[in-house]
Image (tube, rainbow, N blue to C red):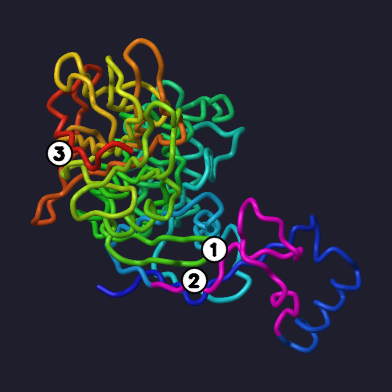
Amino acid sequence: MGAVLQFDKISKLYSLRQVGTGTLSRDLTRWWVTTVKKQEDPFLKIGETNVHGQKGESEFVWALKDVTFDVEQGDVVGIIGKNGSGKSTLLKILSRITSPTTGSINVKGRIASLLEVGTGFHDDLTGRDNIYMNGAILGMNRAEVNRKFDDIVGFSGVERYIDTPVKRYSSGMKVRLGFAVAAFLEPEILIVDEVLAVGDAEFQKRAIGKMQDISKENGRTVLFVSHNMNSVLQLCNRGIVLNEGQMVYDGSSQDAVKKYIGSLTSKTFFEGTDGNTNILYAVRTSVSSPGEGGSVYQSSSPINIEMIVEVVQKIGSLVIGFNLLSQYDYPLARADYNDVSQLHSLEPGRYRVSFEIPPYTLAPGTYKIAFDVAERNRKRYTTDKSALYFDVITGSDNFGHVFPDITPKKLSIVHEKWIKGVEKMSADS
């Protein structure tokens, strides 16, 4: 099909000053070197990598640095990365909102962009007027916009307010109308930033379905920026990972998501003493999944949870287990051994306690494991130091077929089926 987008060593340098380089002498130096002598900007050499949370020495920061890739016609490319990695800067350069400091972009076809709430809208114009204005910007005549007008309004769901100035629209209404305009006016290249997060779940689902139709049925190209990894997996056939302004991965969307989540600081094991060492404590805790590393696991794989516990003194009512919580600390489930129904009392020594969450139990998302080693109804000996975090993404089978999002089961019960066994590792310590 051929490349419709070509990024050739795109870099963007920002000054931390409000205007120019910060001093008149520097501005004159830049003008003399770049305009008169036709040489490279000398201030490009002192720019620093854009590392958030770290104080720099230079007044110049590289938001992007030497980003090079091609996009084929019909590709749906997910661009992912941490906040500040350069995703939105890249799309703004492509949309000609700003220009690159160095490098060039070759574009074939019309581009429609939805980068921020209300992008391309004039607040004092009505929704109807803004539709026609955006169509004109894309090079369409009135007759072409007329053919798409009813589809745009119907998809956006703002029929009642179409003749109301958009400054009276909610942010969700602006996003719905903006996306409908960008999608239905038939651009060759559609650019969508994470503004879809403003819309409700139903609209996000419809928007992703529309982007799939644009790509599959019409052969158009989509660039999609999102922090929702499952949307990227569902929509995109290719993923690009940016980090600190540089491209660190370009490949399949599944591998890109794994690369990105694997770079996050999710904690998947704890090693050390946790609790009162005079009675009992957790020596090590871990979360893992067969054949997968890092902290991201497919929903189609079982998730193994293990805890090594040191029992220093025999306790008559011992509880060993964990609580499963959402990323917002909402309790979902619990699994534990207890001496009343299963173990009786553990003698002093070191024990390995293991659990397994079966495949297709957890919906995609971020989860927290809070371990619990306690005297029943009396005292808990583990602390938050041993808590672990992991992510679940949409699973696939051995043939690469991606399964749809899973509706979570009712988890807020004790799951005895998750309990696998207790193994004594050593004698008295």
Which residues make up the magenta segment?
40-69
- Judged from the image, the secondary structure of the residue bearing numbered disc 3 is loop
How many numbered circles does the render carry? 3
Q: Quadrant of the N terminus?
A: bottom left
Give the amino acid at mark 2. Answer: Val
Q: Tell me where residue 400 appears, x and y as whole percent.
A: 13, 55
Give the amino acid at mark 1. Answer: Gly
**Closer-to-camera residue (353/396):** 353
Q: Does the segment drawn in magenta span residue 127? A: no
Q: Residue at x 62, y 60 (%)?
A: 50
Residue 359 circle label: 3
Circles 1 and 2, Cβ within 8 Å, touching? The answer is: yes
Q: Can you tell which of label 1 and label 2 is closer to the viewer? A: 1
Give the amino acid at mark 3. Answer: Pro
Q: Residue at x 15, y 36 (%)?
A: 360
Q: Does the segment drawn in magenta span residue 56? A: yes
Name of the residue lying farthest toward the left = 399
Give the image quarter of residue 40: bottom right
Quick one: label 2 or label 3, which is nearer the N terminus? 2
In three-dimensional space, the C-alpha distance between marks 2 and 3, rounded to whole angstroms, equals: 38 Å
From this viewpoint, is residue 351 visible? yes
Quick one: label 1 or label 2, which is nearer the N terminus? 2
In three-dimensional space, the C-alpha distance between marks 1 and 2, rounded to whole angstroms, equals: 8 Å
**Closer-to-camera residue (297/348):** 348
In screen coordinates, is 191 left or right of 244? left
Depicted 114 relative to depicted 363: above or below: below
The residue that disc 2 covers is 67
The residue that disc 1 covers is 245
In screen coordinates, is 51 left or right of 274? right
Q: Tell me where residue 335 appears, x and y as whole percent.
A: 23, 24
Residue 384 circle label: none
